């Protein structure tokens, strides 16, 4: 089956945008043509395809695939030893017929974990695109020529698999957050390895002190000295720190829990801040670089995981959050104060009546006629939910846009943000991006961009395997035991 577009990012202030499709990144111009302008595919996927083609050609020429080595058991060894003639084959057991048809069995190579693009973003001017591939944990940086052509600038393998990306205000530093709770700061364009200063201290020769081979002569003391030397060598190997990445990077802050989202913002005095969210219902506000280790305040109030954050640039004092709760939260993030909430589950039930739990996966904001609006998408829900943020910080539902499939990602285009792009997972489709244009206060569907399935570049996945890649937010929800299920299991006198 074809792969959907799972991530979107606009390129500058015009109509260019890029989209991640499986292990590839494609660029489009919304006003020019529905066909992609440029396509980049992960190099390992091309190598795997070349290897597969070589195996197919070998089968056509009658060459068998390479045999797989296996460890022999004791029974196998005994049977081999008991045979005088090495060419002799064991007899067929009674009652078992030999196969009359000597057909060739098709060799199926093992299915590796595919390097899907799991994160995608771009600088505001569209000059650079940053992507993460999950299987190899590589952070890719591409240079954009302004016409849709992407050129690889760097690839850096991160220590842990990143789960969220953000850019500093000057867009020269990448903030990469992983699910182990760490946020790394990396330069957008890495320095050459030769210019990196080594932090290893030089080895200084010191004179021998204490007992050594020149001062110990008895056999028993020699044995004790050798034991001490072996112990010192073992301790030295144990205490050697693990070798980290060779490129320039800095650990800015960390969470005890699994980190889910990171964004950057600033206050009225233009001082930078880093806002992070985690699986343990926390929203933390930390100071920006170089004081990112200082925690300014927490925004506490969620009862389930927090997975999406939105800080409208038109209302930079406001933070909107969502995740596993049935509502959206509105914060004065610098004060850590909850300003209000709005029910989201009731609007989802108008689309899917049997829904009991939701998982918000993306929040974006746009401005229309001096009013601030927020667009929400939820996992496995075929709709967009649009809310209006009023001047008194109340948030009201304005409109619901139905889709043909589940929304995977959303972004806005153009300087006036008059276009919404939605990546939709439509069953039986090769990928679809739906474009909405604003008609007054309402959004109207204008254009579909259909993906082109390329059998030479796209891997073949079952629906079950594809769902494991695309739909991961609901896995953040804690079990009943984690949420205090032990208390619920205690019997009351009436139950006993």
Image (tube, rainbow, N blue to C red):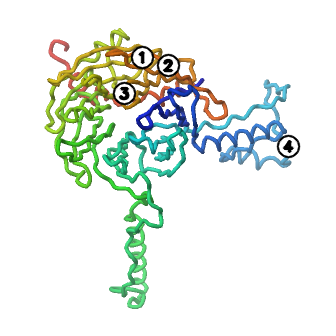
Q: Nearer the viewer, residue 435 or 275?
A: 435
Provide the residue designation for mark 2. 447
Instruction: Say whether residue 35 is left or right of residue 347.
Output: right
Q: Residues within 10 Å of mark 3 (few under 14, many from 20)?
A: some
Mark seen at residue 417: 3
Marked residue nearer the N-terminal end (3 or 4): 4
- Image coordinates of residue 367 in percent, x first then y, are 29, 26
Q: Nearer the viewer, residue 318 or 214?
A: 318
Determine whether the residue tagged by mark 2 lies in a helix, strand or loop. Answer: strand
From the viewer's perspective, is residue 231 above or below residue 168?
Answer: below
Answer yes or no: is residue 388 visible.
Answer: yes
User: What is the total number of numbered labels drawn onto the structure image?
Assistant: 4
- Image coordinates of residue 100 in percent, x first then y, are 85, 25
**Label 4 vs label 1, nearer the camera:** 1
| Tag 4–tag 2 contact (CB < 8 Å) | no
Q: Residues within 10 Å of mark 4 (few under 14, many from 20)?
A: few
Instruction: Say whether residue 26 is left or right of residue 50.
Output: left
Marked residue nearer the N-terminal end (1 or 3): 1
Provide the residue designation for mark 1. 382
Marked residue nearer the N-terminal end (2 or 3): 3
Q: Quadrant of residue 124?
A: top left
Give how far apart the Cα atoms at labels 2 and 3 are: 16 Å
Q: Residue at x 49, y 37 (%)?
A: 117
From the viewer's perspective, is residue 392 above or below residue 46?
Answer: above
Provide the residue designation for mark 4. 88
Give how far apart the Cα atoms at labels 3 and 4 are: 77 Å
Determine whether the residue tagged by mark 3 lies in a helix, strand or loop. Answer: loop
| Tag 1–tag 2 contact (CB < 8 Å) | no
User: Split into 4 quadrants, where in the image is the C terminus?
Assistant: top left
């Amino acid at each position: 089956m074809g792969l959907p577009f799972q991530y979107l990012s606009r390129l500058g202030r015009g109509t260019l945008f890029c989209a991640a499709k499986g292990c590839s990144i494609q660029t489009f111009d919304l006003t020019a043509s529905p066909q992609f302008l440029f396509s980049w595919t992960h190099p390992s996927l091309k190598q795997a395809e070349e290897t597969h083609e070589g195996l197919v050609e070998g089968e056509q020429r009658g060459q068998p695939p390479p045999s797989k080595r296996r460890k022999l058991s004791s029974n196998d060894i005994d049977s081999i030893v008991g045979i005088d003639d090495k060419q002799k084959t064991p007899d067929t057991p009674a009652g078992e017929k030999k196969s009359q048809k000597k057909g060739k069995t098709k060799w199926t190579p093992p299915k590796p974990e595919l390097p899907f693009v799991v994160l995608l973003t771009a600088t505001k001017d569209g000059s650079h695109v940053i992507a993460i591939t999950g299987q190899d944990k590589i952070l890719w940086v591409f240079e954009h020529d302004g016409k849709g052509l992407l050129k690889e600038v760097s690839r850096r393998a991160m220590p842990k698999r990143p789960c969220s990306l953000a850019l500093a205000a000057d867009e020269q530093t990448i903030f990469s957050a992983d699910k182990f709770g760490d946020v790394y700061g990396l330069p957008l364009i890495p320095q050459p390895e030769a210019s990196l200063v080594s932090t290893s201290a030089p080895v200084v020769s010191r004179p021998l002190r204490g007992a050594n081979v020149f001062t110990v002569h008895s056999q028993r003391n020699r044995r004790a000295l050798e034991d001490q030397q072996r112990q010192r060598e073992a301790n030295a190997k144990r205490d050697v720190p693990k070798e980290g990445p060779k490129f320039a990077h800095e650990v800015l802050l960390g969470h005890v829990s699994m980190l889910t989202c990171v964004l950057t913002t600033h206050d009225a005095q233009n001082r930078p801040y880093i806002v992070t969210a985690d699986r343990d219902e926390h929203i933390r506000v930390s100071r920006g670089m170089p004081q990112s280790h200082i925690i300014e305040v927490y925004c506490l109030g969620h009862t389930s995981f927090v997975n999406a954050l939105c800080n409208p640039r038109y209302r930079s004092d406001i933070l909107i959050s969502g995740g596993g709760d049935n509502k959206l939260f509105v914060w004065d993030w610098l004060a850590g104060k909850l300003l209000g909430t709005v029910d989201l589950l009731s609007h989802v039930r108008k689309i899917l009546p049997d829904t009991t739990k939701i998982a918000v996966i993306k929040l974006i904001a746009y401005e229309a006629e001096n009013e601030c609006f927020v667009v929400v998408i939820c996992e496995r829900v075929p709709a967009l939910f649009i809310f209006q943020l009023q001047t008194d910080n109340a948030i009201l539902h304005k409109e619901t846009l139905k889709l043909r499939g589940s929304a995977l990602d959303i972004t806005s285009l153009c300087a006036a943000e008059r276009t919404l792009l939605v990546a939709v997972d439509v069953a039986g489709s090769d990928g679809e991006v739906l474009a909405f244009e604003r008609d007054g206060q309402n959004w109207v569907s204008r254009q579909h961009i259909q993906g082109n399935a390329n059998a030479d570049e796209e891997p073949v996945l079952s629906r079950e395997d594809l769902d494991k890649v695309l739909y991961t937010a609901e896995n953040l929800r804690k079990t009943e035991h984690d949420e205090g299920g032990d208390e619920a299991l205690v019997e009351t006198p009436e139950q006993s």
